[in-house]
Amino acid sequence: MAKVASLITFALMGLLLVIAVVEGGSPVGKPGYRIHTLFSVECQNYFDWQTVGLMHSFSKARQPGPITRLLSCTDEEKKSYRGMHLAPTFQVPSMSRHPKTGDWYPAINKPAGVVHWLNHSEEAKHVDWVVILDADMIIRGPIIPTELGAERGRPVSAYYGYLVGCDNILAKIHTKHPELCDKVGGLLAMHIDDLRALAPKWLAKTEEVREDKAHWSTNITGDIYGKGWISEMYGYSFGAAEVGLRHKINDDLMIYPGYIPRPGVEPILFHYGLPFTVGNWSFSKLQHHEDDIIYRCGELFPEPPYPREVYTMESEPNKRRALLLSVECMNTLNEGLVLRHAADGCPKPKWSKYLSFLKSKTFANLSRPKIFSPGVQQTMEAGEDQQPLFGETMKPHPKIHTVFSTECSPYFDWQTVGLIHSFHLSGQPGNITRLLSCTDEDLKQYKGHDLAPTHYVPSMSRHPLTGDWYPAINKPAGVLHWLNHVGDIDAEYIVILDADMILRGPITPWEFNASRGHPVSTPYEYLIGCDNELAEMHTSHPEYCDKVGGVIIMHIDDLRKFAMYWLLKTEEVRFDKEHYATNLTGDIYSSGWISEMYGYSFGAAELKLRHVVSREILIYPGYVPEQGVKYRVFHYGLEFSVGNWSFDKANWRDKDIVNTCWAQFPDPPDPSTLDRTDENILQKNLLSIECGKKLNEALMLHHSKRNCPDPSSPILTSPKLETRTSRKFGKIEEKPKTSTVPARYTQELSQADQNDGHFRSLKVWVVALWAFSGLGFVVVMTMVFSGRKSKGTKGKSSRSRKRHSSQDSWT
């Protein structure tokens, strides 16, 4: 019997060994490899629909291990909260209102929730690896820390390049080890021991940075709003530096819908924190801040275009792939809502083409789990330059920096908001800097310091030597000042834009073939001075004068040599008043207003720079696009219209839209209302509508970030506005009672105001004449009808008598 028992025991051990071998040795879930996923939310409808999306994708992507929602709520909020069933939940005391300082900062709930979970959850005792996500994410494939390269002391994260405070005084103030500060965020994958060491520091450093209001400015933090809103992100980076963690930074794991992925890269995580568009369809999570969509049976977010429609929209493979990823993100969100409604007992929804697609094998195949491949993994080791890496077989693209010039005025502020918003959506590589030209007096009253990363430039609007008033000279002066006063410009190519532009896609030297000695620009055919005596007078190489402007892509070595020429030639042409005539310059006003443009062309000619001229970069809204061209930039410098709706930037010169809560431009028409008879006109109108919508989208995002009061509230803390009917039919203009326009603009505006006054005076006389004519018409017609009435009565009596006499004769 003992021998039999031994044989049975031996056989069982062999069977267990075979099972272990057959299972392939996947260690996930075993001690040492146990994964737990966390995300932080609050008791709000806004986070509930995000929770539904994330939980659905967690299941769909087959993410290993459990998931826990860290739910931060006040006791009062819990009484009316409906979403306890939406996810496995660990309740956390709310710190949205700081218990000691009273500061309102909901983002602090993330590190506070993690600390509370580590200290009070039984689950935290049985975990080896932790994946920390945000609620506004969609998982596309399993996130396994060890397969991503995570080790003890070496977490994996995504690259957050805008955390510039890691490189300046902010890191020196808030961590003893600024050299260990990593610009990371979004996705975090780390060992539980590292998290236990980090979490208290994460919370403490968040509080510390949040209280350091003296260093909230955009130039120090990279926060475009300068409100300390990203203090939690710095709290993480500074906390990690304090405990000596160095991250493996992978820029391929996570993507924002709307961004273009690198060729061959399959992201395993969507982060839909920014608005994104596909054709005329768009989605912004901020537009659904109060949306209780998960509690309304049958309700879904607006359906995006179908994949087959995307193939007809875009022929370029990488851009088309970006659009398809955006569509996949939205469809996964809606699929989660459909399943949530069904689980909550909602009636079966009526059949629709879109619901049928979400349940189809086609969508199932398109959204099946994406497996991370180590073959495409590219991480940055400690001490390496923290920029997204390129594959070993690919030549790295040169670094790019974008700049644009503005002044201290509300007019340029709303343009800045539009450009910065579009920059972040466009996929434009590198950083962006605003060259802000202001007088000392302007700066004292200026409110828009936080609108963009900024380099301050002394104003040359009033020339310091001649007294000439010419604000356009600030553009070359600003570029020259930036080159001479910024110590290390970490870029090989500089892209120069105007403030009144909206980016639709990336503008890169490799796509448009810029090189040393060969900048790229767009055609400005009206610069006829390149072909006549003007060029012969102002450049020794008139044959090199190119009629270009608008968008410029130039190698930094060329720009350093060229910038001074640009400024000097601008001054030279501006002072040459004898040759302002339209037949020489093409300036229809003959006022020397385009001297800066000639300064550019003549300065480039002096250095014999020969431009690559592209007609596929820029379009003015209101112009008919060339068929098949995907323009990268809207330049809304001219008035454009669609039907009765129109937009002219000059009409908004003195409107403080940026600092007036929820102020925006009149909404353009709905694309579905357009006449589709003429394809050229249709495409022109669609582009005009897109430009108008993008400006308003930027403003709404700006107002929401400024914590403007709920727009549905009856009381808004915005200044009183006077309204007057514009000479543009159907448009109402808002005029602040106290103008915030700097004095230097009054001269430019006086002529327009005078003309408008003449128009209103004429309009009064026209109305009076019309009223007098109408009154006269009424009097005359009354007299006529009175006369006809008496005659009609007499005739009727006569006819009556005739009828009676006729009847009498028959009787």
Image (cartoon, grey):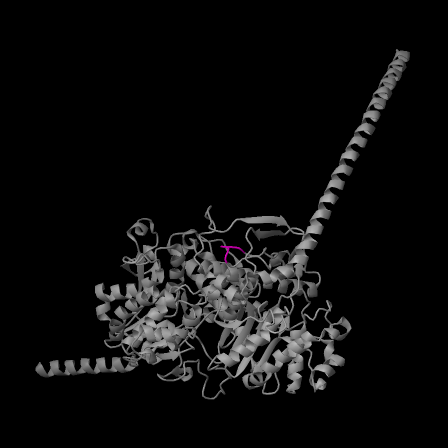
Position above or below: 463 against 385: above
The answer to whether any part of residue 85 appears in the image is yes
Query: In terms of depth relative to the viewer, which is nearer, 527 or 613?
Result: 527
Kindly indicate the quadrant of the structure image that contains residue 685.
Answer: bottom right
Q: Position of residue 141 (x, y in %)?
A: 39, 73
Image quadrant containing the C terminus: top right
Where does the magenta region start and end?
659-663
Question: Is residue 249 magenta-colored?
Answer: no
Residue 511 placement, left or right of 640: left
Q: Nearer the viewer, residue 703 or 94?
A: 703
Residue 135 in the image, given as x and y percentages of width and height: 38, 64
Task: Name the residue at 58% across, 52% down.
Answer: 735
- Screen quadrant of the N terminus: bottom left
Q: x, y (%) of residue 434?
A: 52, 71
For the image, the number of numbered tags is 0
Instruction: Say whether residue 661 is magenta.
Output: yes
Q: Nearer the viewer, residue 551 or 465?
A: 465
Task: Assign the magenta stretch its main secondary structure.
Answer: loop
The answer to whether 295 is drawn above or below residue 306 in the figure is above
Percent position of residue 720, x then y:
52, 49
Q: Is residue 2 left or right of 775 when viewed as pictured?
A: left
Left or right, 138 with reference to 501: left
The residue under the point 55% across, 86% down is: 557
Residue 133 in sight here: no
Toward which corner of the image does residue 609 lie, by quadrant? bottom right
State the residue at coordinates (67%, 81%). 602
Which quarter of the picture shows residue 678?
bottom right
Q: Residue furthest left?
A: 2
